[in-house]
Amino acid sequence: DALRFFSPAAGPLNHHGHSMKREKQLELEQKGCVHVQMDLLKMTMKLEPFNDPVLLQRVLELALDARKMDVSASPYDVSEYGVGVIPVETSEGRAEYREQQVALMDRAEPVRQEVLQAYDLFLALGFDEHIQEKPSPERYAKAEPGGLPWRKNPIAQAEAVEK
């Protein structure tokens, strides 16, 4: 979890250090991490209402299973909610967790590919080809106090072209 891996005290043990940046997420993300399966739900929801509801159901089921596994390995006793315990403090518990993690990752891979295909289809249907190949600078604009406005004024652009 974040506290264990990214606290300042854990920094020397983690070869990425104790802080990570959002820009590095795609480079550093590991498909076996249970939190990635939960993030898959977040990314799928960003496509609503353009998703196939069956795909959304499959992603939700994966995310719920990932969350259940995550809670099972936590230090909290949630057995009264029907969630088992994975004793990750023991070698047997770590082996059990690893086994479930790999099974979840294998189950998630075809669903992940479907989500990527859904994004590709959305982009192909929703945007001109030239926008996909070379996005305008406004897509990567940075808001800074006193900086230039991030939106271009279409009237000013038309007047500049006429001159």
Image (spheres, rainbow, N blue to C red):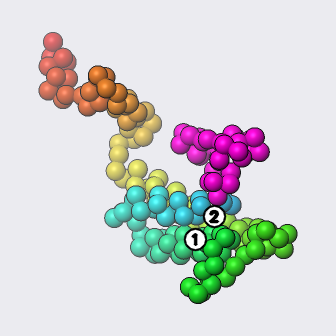
Count every numbered label the image shows and give the total. Answer: 2
Residue 27 location, x and y as percent? 63, 43
- Image disc number at residue 34: 2
Q: Earlier in the sequence, mark 2 or mark 1?
A: 2
- Image disc number at residue 137: none
Depth check: 121 or 149 in front?
Answer: 149
Give above or below for 141 relative to 86.
above
Instruction: Check contact, mark 2 vs mark 1: CB within 8 A.
Output: yes
Residue 51 location, x and y as percent? 40, 66
On screen, residue 15 versus residue 92, left or right, reads left
Q: Residues within 10 Å of mark 2 (few under 14, many from 20)?
A: many
Q: Residues within 10 Å of mark 1 (few under 14, many from 20)?
A: some
Q: Residue at x 29, y 22 (%)?
A: 146
- Image disc number at residue 67: 1
Is residue 16 part of the magenta span, yes or no? Answer: yes
Amino acid at pointer 1: Arg
- How far is the residue under mark 2 from the one under mark 1? 7 Å
Name the outermost residue toward the front.
9
Give above or below for 64 relative to 82.
above
Residue 133 location, x and y as percent? 45, 36
Give above or below for 139 relative to 85.
above
Amino acid at pointer 2: Val
Q: Quadrant of residue 63?
A: bottom right
Whether residue 30 is visible to the viewer of this picture, yes or no, is: no
Magenta highlight range: 1-30
The N terminus: image quadrant = bottom right
Q: Main secondary structure of the magenta part?
A: helix
On screen, residue 106 versus residue 63, left or right, reads right
